Amino acid sequence: MRDVSIQSIRAKRRVASPRYSLVIPIYNEEEVLPKLVERIRTLLCQLDGESEAIFVDDGSHDKSAELLRNMVAVEPRFRLIELSRNFGHQIAITAGMNAATGDAVIVMDADLQDPPEVVLDLVAKWKEGFEIVYARRVKREGESLFKRITASLFYRLLERMTSVDIPRDVGDFRLVGRKALETFKQMPEQDRFVRGMFGWMGFNQATVPFERPARTIGQTKYPFWKMMHLAVHGIVSFSETPLRLALWGGLVISGLAMSYGVYAMLAWIFESGVIAGWTSTVVIVSFLCGVNLFMTGVVGLYVGGIHAEVKRRPLYVIERRSGFDEKGHARAS
Ligand code: UDP
Ligand code: MG
Protein backbone atom coordinates (compact mmCIF):
# COMPACT_ATOMS: atom_id res chain seq x y z
CA MET A 1 0.00 0.00 0.00
CA ARG A 2 2.77 2.37 1.09
CA ASP A 3 4.79 1.39 -1.96
CA VAL A 4 1.99 2.27 -4.28
CA SER A 5 1.54 5.74 -2.83
CA ILE A 6 5.29 6.45 -2.98
CA GLN A 7 5.36 5.33 -6.55
CA SER A 8 2.46 7.51 -7.58
CA ILE A 9 4.12 10.57 -6.02
CA ARG A 10 7.31 9.75 -7.88
CA ALA A 11 5.45 9.19 -11.08
CA LYS A 12 3.84 12.58 -10.83
CA ARG A 13 7.13 14.31 -10.19
CA ARG A 14 8.74 12.50 -13.04
CA VAL A 15 6.20 13.37 -15.68
CA ALA A 16 7.06 17.07 -15.39
CA SER A 17 9.23 17.50 -18.47
CA PRO A 18 11.98 14.95 -17.96
CA ARG A 19 15.25 15.09 -19.88
CA TYR A 20 16.50 12.00 -21.62
CA SER A 21 20.01 11.01 -22.67
CA LEU A 22 20.78 8.09 -24.94
CA VAL A 23 24.29 6.65 -24.75
CA ILE A 24 25.44 4.64 -27.75
CA PRO A 25 28.92 3.06 -27.95
CA ILE A 26 30.29 2.80 -31.48
CA TYR A 27 33.12 0.60 -32.65
CA ASN A 28 33.56 0.19 -36.39
CA GLU A 29 29.86 0.54 -37.17
CA GLU A 30 29.99 2.62 -40.37
CA GLU A 31 27.58 0.32 -42.22
CA VAL A 32 24.87 0.57 -39.63
CA LEU A 33 25.23 4.28 -38.79
CA PRO A 34 22.87 5.82 -41.39
CA LYS A 35 20.05 3.50 -40.38
CA LEU A 36 20.82 3.86 -36.69
CA VAL A 37 20.78 7.64 -36.83
CA GLU A 38 17.45 7.64 -38.61
CA ARG A 39 15.92 5.35 -35.97
CA ILE A 40 17.41 7.42 -33.14
CA ARG A 41 15.98 10.61 -34.61
CA THR A 42 12.53 9.05 -34.73
CA LEU A 43 12.92 7.89 -31.16
CA LEU A 44 14.05 11.31 -29.90
CA CYS A 45 10.88 12.80 -31.41
CA GLN A 46 8.71 10.20 -29.67
CA LEU A 47 10.14 10.91 -26.22
CA ASP A 48 8.06 13.28 -24.12
CA GLY A 49 10.82 15.65 -23.07
CA GLU A 50 14.09 17.24 -24.11
CA SER A 51 16.51 14.64 -25.30
CA GLU A 52 20.08 14.12 -26.46
CA ALA A 53 21.96 11.23 -28.03
CA ILE A 54 25.58 10.82 -26.98
CA PHE A 55 27.61 8.68 -29.36
CA VAL A 56 30.91 7.38 -28.00
CA ASP A 57 33.37 6.45 -30.69
CA ASP A 58 35.54 3.77 -29.13
CA GLY A 59 38.57 4.21 -31.38
CA SER A 60 36.94 2.95 -34.58
CA HIS A 61 39.27 2.24 -37.48
CA ASP A 62 36.64 2.84 -40.14
CA LYS A 63 34.77 6.00 -41.06
CA SER A 64 32.38 5.90 -38.07
CA ALA A 65 33.92 8.91 -36.31
CA GLU A 66 33.94 11.02 -39.43
CA LEU A 67 30.33 10.16 -40.26
CA LEU A 68 29.27 10.94 -36.70
CA ARG A 69 31.08 14.29 -36.72
CA ASN A 70 29.14 15.28 -39.80
CA MET A 71 25.87 14.22 -38.23
CA VAL A 72 26.58 16.07 -34.98
CA ALA A 73 27.27 19.22 -36.98
CA VAL A 74 23.75 19.28 -38.38
CA GLU A 75 21.71 17.78 -35.54
CA PRO A 76 21.68 19.85 -32.32
CA ARG A 77 20.51 16.92 -30.19
CA PHE A 78 23.52 14.75 -31.10
CA ARG A 79 26.82 14.79 -29.26
CA LEU A 80 30.00 12.87 -29.92
CA ILE A 81 32.82 11.77 -27.66
CA GLU A 82 35.83 10.34 -29.46
CA LEU A 83 38.09 8.18 -27.31
CA SER A 84 41.79 8.21 -28.17
CA ARG A 85 41.86 4.46 -28.83
CA ASN A 86 39.74 1.34 -28.40
CA PHE A 87 39.03 1.11 -24.66
CA GLY A 88 36.32 -1.54 -24.89
CA HIS A 89 32.54 -1.56 -24.71
CA GLN A 90 32.18 -1.19 -20.94
CA ILE A 91 34.50 1.82 -20.75
CA ALA A 92 32.83 3.44 -23.77
CA ILE A 93 29.49 3.17 -21.98
CA THR A 94 31.04 4.73 -18.88
CA ALA A 95 32.41 7.67 -20.88
CA GLY A 96 28.97 8.32 -22.36
CA MET A 97 27.17 8.05 -19.03
CA ASN A 98 29.60 10.44 -17.37
CA ALA A 99 28.71 13.05 -19.97
CA ALA A 100 24.95 12.48 -19.85
CA THR A 101 22.80 15.28 -18.45
CA GLY A 102 19.37 13.60 -18.56
CA ASP A 103 17.07 12.65 -15.71
CA ALA A 104 16.92 9.24 -17.34
CA VAL A 105 19.88 7.79 -19.21
CA ILE A 106 19.43 4.96 -21.65
CA VAL A 107 22.32 2.81 -22.85
CA MET A 108 21.90 0.89 -26.09
CA ASP A 109 24.03 -0.90 -28.67
CA ALA A 110 24.60 0.63 -32.06
CA ASP A 111 23.74 -2.42 -34.12
CA LEU A 112 19.93 -2.15 -33.74
CA GLN A 113 19.90 -5.39 -31.80
CA ASP A 114 18.53 -3.22 -29.03
CA PRO A 115 15.46 -1.91 -30.88
CA PRO A 116 15.03 1.83 -30.18
CA GLU A 117 11.26 1.33 -29.78
CA VAL A 118 11.83 -0.68 -26.60
CA VAL A 119 13.18 2.51 -25.04
CA LEU A 120 9.59 3.77 -24.78
CA ASP A 121 8.72 0.73 -22.65
CA LEU A 122 11.78 1.37 -20.47
CA VAL A 123 10.69 4.97 -19.99
CA ALA A 124 7.14 3.90 -19.07
CA LYS A 125 8.54 1.60 -16.35
CA TRP A 126 10.84 4.36 -15.08
CA LYS A 127 7.82 6.60 -14.71
CA GLU A 128 6.19 3.95 -12.55
CA GLY A 129 8.94 4.72 -10.06
CA PHE A 130 11.73 2.28 -10.88
CA GLU A 131 15.24 3.72 -10.76
CA ILE A 132 16.88 1.11 -12.97
CA VAL A 133 15.02 -0.64 -15.77
CA TYR A 134 16.66 -3.47 -17.71
CA ALA A 135 15.56 -4.77 -21.07
CA ARG A 136 15.55 -8.53 -20.73
CA ARG A 137 16.11 -10.69 -23.82
CA VAL A 138 13.36 -13.26 -24.04
CA LYS A 139 14.31 -14.47 -27.47
CA ARG A 140 17.70 -14.26 -29.09
CA GLU A 141 17.42 -14.42 -32.82
CA GLY A 142 20.36 -15.14 -35.02
CA GLU A 143 22.68 -16.06 -32.18
CA SER A 144 24.52 -19.30 -32.54
CA LEU A 145 23.55 -22.19 -30.30
CA PHE A 146 27.04 -21.92 -28.84
CA LYS A 147 26.57 -18.28 -27.84
CA ARG A 148 23.14 -19.00 -26.38
CA ILE A 149 24.43 -21.90 -24.31
CA THR A 150 27.53 -20.10 -23.08
CA ALA A 151 25.53 -16.97 -22.24
CA SER A 152 22.97 -18.98 -20.32
CA LEU A 153 25.69 -20.90 -18.44
CA PHE A 154 27.46 -17.66 -17.62
CA TYR A 155 24.40 -15.97 -16.14
CA ARG A 156 23.57 -19.00 -14.05
CA LEU A 157 27.14 -19.38 -12.82
CA LEU A 158 27.31 -15.69 -11.99
CA GLU A 159 24.07 -15.95 -10.06
CA ARG A 160 25.41 -18.81 -7.96
CA MET A 161 28.82 -17.32 -7.35
CA THR A 162 27.97 -13.76 -6.41
CA SER A 163 25.86 -12.29 -3.68
CA VAL A 164 24.88 -9.37 -5.90
CA ASP A 165 21.56 -9.53 -7.74
CA ILE A 166 22.42 -9.42 -11.41
CA PRO A 167 19.27 -10.15 -13.39
CA ARG A 168 19.46 -12.99 -15.88
CA ASP A 169 19.58 -12.43 -19.62
CA VAL A 170 20.05 -8.71 -19.45
CA GLY A 171 22.81 -7.08 -21.38
CA ASP A 172 23.77 -3.45 -21.26
CA PHE A 173 20.49 -2.23 -22.71
CA ARG A 174 18.99 -0.35 -19.77
CA LEU A 175 17.59 2.87 -18.43
CA VAL A 176 18.94 4.41 -15.25
CA GLY A 177 17.60 7.34 -13.31
CA ARG A 178 19.64 10.29 -12.08
CA LYS A 179 20.20 8.83 -8.59
CA ALA A 180 21.57 5.57 -9.96
CA LEU A 181 23.72 7.50 -12.41
CA GLU A 182 25.24 9.66 -9.68
CA THR A 183 26.00 6.50 -7.68
CA PHE A 184 27.59 4.95 -10.76
CA LYS A 185 29.82 7.98 -11.23
CA GLN A 186 31.15 7.49 -7.72
CA MET A 187 32.33 3.98 -8.53
CA PRO A 188 35.90 4.43 -9.74
CA GLU A 189 36.78 0.78 -10.34
CA GLN A 190 38.97 0.07 -13.34
CA ASP A 191 37.69 -3.40 -13.91
CA ARG A 192 34.21 -2.54 -15.01
CA PHE A 193 31.38 -4.98 -15.37
CA VAL A 194 28.70 -2.37 -15.71
CA ARG A 195 25.64 -4.59 -15.32
CA GLY A 196 27.06 -5.97 -12.07
CA MET A 197 27.71 -2.46 -10.81
CA PHE A 198 24.08 -1.49 -11.31
CA GLY A 199 22.96 -4.74 -9.69
CA TRP A 200 25.14 -3.94 -6.68
CA MET A 201 23.73 -0.49 -6.00
CA GLY A 202 20.20 -1.59 -5.16
CA PHE A 203 17.29 0.84 -5.70
CA ASN A 204 13.98 -0.21 -7.20
CA GLN A 205 14.83 -2.28 -10.25
CA ALA A 206 12.60 -3.74 -12.94
CA THR A 207 12.92 -5.57 -16.23
CA VAL A 208 11.05 -5.16 -19.49
CA PRO A 209 11.02 -8.17 -21.84
CA PHE A 210 11.96 -7.80 -25.50
CA GLU A 211 12.80 -10.03 -28.43
CA ARG A 212 16.35 -9.48 -29.50
CA PRO A 213 16.60 -9.50 -33.28
CA ALA A 214 19.68 -10.73 -35.13
CA ARG A 215 22.42 -8.29 -36.07
CA THR A 216 21.49 -7.49 -39.67
CA ILE A 217 24.33 -5.20 -40.59
CA GLY A 218 28.01 -5.58 -39.76
CA GLN A 219 29.75 -8.15 -37.64
CA THR A 220 29.76 -8.73 -33.91
CA LYS A 221 32.54 -6.82 -32.19
CA TYR A 222 32.56 -9.43 -29.46
CA PRO A 223 34.62 -12.35 -30.66
CA PHE A 224 34.83 -15.41 -28.42
CA TRP A 225 37.92 -14.32 -26.49
CA LYS A 226 36.44 -10.90 -25.71
CA MET A 227 33.30 -12.60 -24.42
CA MET A 228 35.41 -14.88 -22.22
CA HIS A 229 37.31 -11.88 -20.93
CA LEU A 230 34.06 -10.13 -19.99
CA ALA A 231 32.76 -13.28 -18.31
CA VAL A 232 35.93 -13.85 -16.28
CA HIS A 233 36.09 -10.23 -15.19
CA GLY A 234 32.41 -10.23 -14.34
CA ILE A 235 32.99 -13.13 -11.97
CA VAL A 236 36.29 -11.94 -10.54
CA SER A 237 35.04 -8.44 -9.80
CA PHE A 238 31.89 -9.61 -8.10
CA SER A 239 32.83 -12.84 -6.38
CA GLU A 240 35.50 -14.33 -4.18
CA THR A 241 34.22 -17.85 -4.84
CA PRO A 242 37.08 -18.76 -7.23
CA LEU A 243 39.61 -17.87 -4.52
CA ARG A 244 37.75 -20.00 -2.02
CA LEU A 245 37.40 -22.83 -4.53
CA ALA A 246 41.13 -22.63 -5.18
CA LEU A 247 41.77 -22.97 -1.48
CA TRP A 248 39.46 -25.95 -0.96
CA GLY A 249 40.46 -27.60 -4.22
CA GLY A 250 44.11 -27.20 -3.26
CA LEU A 251 43.45 -28.68 0.19
CA VAL A 252 41.52 -31.69 -1.10
CA ILE A 253 44.10 -32.47 -3.74
CA SER A 254 47.07 -32.13 -1.41
CA GLY A 255 45.20 -34.37 1.05
CA LEU A 256 44.77 -37.02 -1.63
CA ALA A 257 48.41 -36.70 -2.69
CA MET A 258 49.56 -37.08 0.94
CA SER A 259 47.45 -40.20 1.51
CA TYR A 260 48.93 -41.68 -1.63
CA GLY A 261 52.41 -40.85 -0.30
CA VAL A 262 51.64 -42.60 3.01
CA TYR A 263 50.33 -45.62 1.11
CA ALA A 264 53.51 -45.72 -0.97
CA MET A 265 55.65 -45.58 2.16
CA LEU A 266 53.69 -48.34 3.87
CA ALA A 267 53.96 -50.49 0.77
CA TRP A 268 57.69 -49.86 0.69
CA ILE A 269 58.05 -50.88 4.36
CA PHE A 270 55.76 -53.90 4.43
CA GLU A 271 55.86 -55.33 0.95
CA SER A 272 58.98 -56.66 -0.62
CA GLY A 273 60.00 -55.94 -4.16
CA VAL A 274 58.00 -52.74 -4.62
CA ILE A 275 59.66 -50.56 -7.19
CA ALA A 276 58.55 -46.97 -7.17
CA GLY A 277 56.64 -46.53 -10.40
CA TRP A 278 58.09 -43.94 -12.68
CA THR A 279 54.75 -43.39 -14.39
CA SER A 280 52.81 -42.71 -11.23
CA THR A 281 55.49 -40.29 -10.04
CA VAL A 282 55.34 -38.36 -13.27
CA VAL A 283 51.56 -38.36 -13.26
CA ILE A 284 51.32 -37.09 -9.70
CA VAL A 285 54.01 -34.46 -10.11
CA SER A 286 52.53 -33.08 -13.29
CA PHE A 287 49.01 -33.19 -11.90
CA LEU A 288 50.02 -31.26 -8.82
CA CYS A 289 52.00 -28.79 -10.89
CA GLY A 290 48.90 -28.25 -12.99
CA VAL A 291 46.68 -27.70 -9.97
CA ASN A 292 49.27 -25.40 -8.47
CA LEU A 293 49.49 -23.33 -11.61
CA PHE A 294 45.73 -23.10 -11.81
CA MET A 295 45.47 -21.87 -8.23
CA THR A 296 48.25 -19.37 -8.81
CA GLY A 297 46.39 -18.21 -11.89
CA VAL A 298 43.21 -17.63 -9.91
CA VAL A 299 45.10 -15.66 -7.30
CA GLY A 300 46.88 -13.83 -10.11
CA LEU A 301 43.55 -12.66 -11.53
CA TYR A 302 42.71 -10.94 -8.29
CA VAL A 303 46.24 -9.59 -7.82
CA GLY A 304 46.05 -8.26 -11.39
CA GLY A 305 42.80 -6.55 -10.44
CA ILE A 306 44.49 -4.91 -7.45
CA HIS A 307 47.38 -3.87 -9.66
CA ALA A 308 45.04 -2.17 -12.11
CA GLU A 309 43.20 -0.41 -9.28
CA VAL A 310 46.23 0.98 -7.49
CA LYS A 311 47.54 2.65 -10.61
CA ARG A 312 44.58 5.03 -10.44
CA ARG A 313 44.79 5.86 -14.09
CA PRO A 314 41.87 7.60 -15.71
CA LEU A 315 39.48 5.09 -17.21
CA TYR A 316 39.66 6.55 -20.68
CA VAL A 317 41.17 9.37 -22.68
CA ILE A 318 38.95 11.68 -24.71
CA GLU A 319 40.49 12.90 -27.92
CA ARG A 320 37.70 15.18 -29.04
CA ARG A 321 34.18 16.18 -28.07
CA SER A 322 31.65 17.68 -30.41
CA GLY A 323 28.15 18.96 -29.78
CA PHE A 324 28.94 20.03 -26.19
CA ASP A 325 29.50 23.65 -25.15
CA GLU A 326 32.94 24.81 -23.85
CA LYS A 327 32.14 24.08 -20.21
CA GLY A 328 31.58 20.52 -21.19
CA HIS A 329 27.86 20.67 -20.54
CA ALA A 330 25.60 19.51 -23.27
CA ARG A 331 24.25 22.52 -25.07
CA ALA A 332 20.55 23.21 -24.91
CA SER A 333 18.57 21.57 -27.64
N1 UDP B 1 31.59 -1.85 -28.93
C1 UDP B 1 32.46 -0.86 -28.44
N2 UDP B 1 33.77 -1.22 -28.21
C2 UDP B 1 34.25 -2.48 -28.41
C3 UDP B 1 33.34 -3.48 -28.85
C4 UDP B 1 32.03 -3.12 -29.10
O1 UDP B 1 32.07 0.29 -28.26
O2 UDP B 1 35.44 -2.72 -28.19
C5 UDP B 1 30.18 -1.47 -29.19
C6 UDP B 1 29.63 -1.89 -30.55
O3 UDP B 1 29.85 -0.90 -31.51
C7 UDP B 1 28.15 -2.06 -30.25
C8 UDP B 1 28.14 -2.55 -28.81
O4 UDP B 1 29.40 -2.18 -28.25
O5 UDP B 1 27.45 -0.84 -30.30
C9 UDP B 1 27.92 -4.04 -28.70
O6 UDP B 1 28.79 -4.75 -29.54
P1 UDP B 1 28.31 -5.98 -30.43
O7 UDP B 1 26.97 -5.71 -31.02
O8 UDP B 1 29.40 -6.27 -31.41
O9 UDP B 1 28.21 -7.12 -29.34
P2 UDP B 1 27.15 -8.34 -29.31
O10 UDP B 1 25.78 -7.76 -29.51
O11 UDP B 1 27.55 -9.24 -30.42
O12 UDP B 1 27.34 -8.93 -27.95
MG1 MG C 1 25.18 -6.67 -30.99
Image: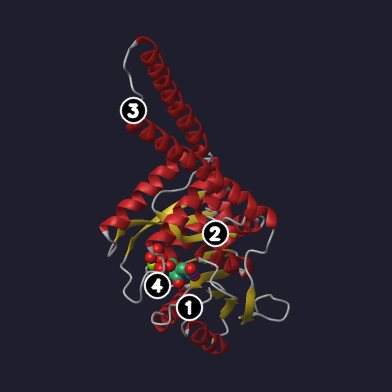
| Mark number, residue 141 | none
Q: Is residue 111 visible?
A: yes
Mark 2 and mark 1: span between their CA atoms? 20 Å
Type of the residue with mark 1: Cys
Which of the two labelled residues, at mark 3 and mark 1, occupies the earlier sequence position? Answer: 1
Type of the residue with mark 3: Gly
The furthest residue to the top: 270
User: For mark 4, what is the residue?
Assistant: 111
User: For mark 1, what is the residue?
Assistant: 45
User: For mark 2, what is the residue?
Assistant: 176
Q: Kindly check if marks 3 and 1 are in contact, taking CB atoms under 8 A apart as contact.
A: no
Which of the two labelled residues, at mark 2 and mark 1, occupies the earlier sequence position? Answer: 1
2 or 1: mark nearer the eye = 2
Type of the residue with mark 2: Val
Residue 277 located left or right of residue 67: left
Q: Taking 135 as reference, is 239 above or below it?
A: above
| Neighbours of disc 4 within 10 Å: few (<14), some (14-19), many (20+) | many
Which of the two labelled residues, at mark 2 and mark 3, occupies the earlier sequence position? Answer: 2
Q: Kindly check if marks 3 and 4 are in contact, taking CB atoms under 8 A apart as contact.
A: no
Callout 4: SS: loop
Q: Taking 278 as reference, is 180 above or below it?
A: below
Callout 2: SS: strand
| Neighbours of disc 2 within 10 Å: few (<14), some (14-19), many (20+) | many
Quick check: is the Cβ at mark 4 less than 8 Å away from ligand 2?
yes
The furthest residue to the right: 327
Q: What residue sits 52% from the left and 83% below the top?
A: 65
Callout 3: SS: loop
User: For mark 3, what is the residue?
Assistant: 277
Mark 3 and mark 4: span between their CA atoms? 60 Å
Type of the residue with mark 4: Asp
Q: What residue sits 61% from the left and 69% below the top?
A: 100
Closer to the camera, 270 or 169? 270
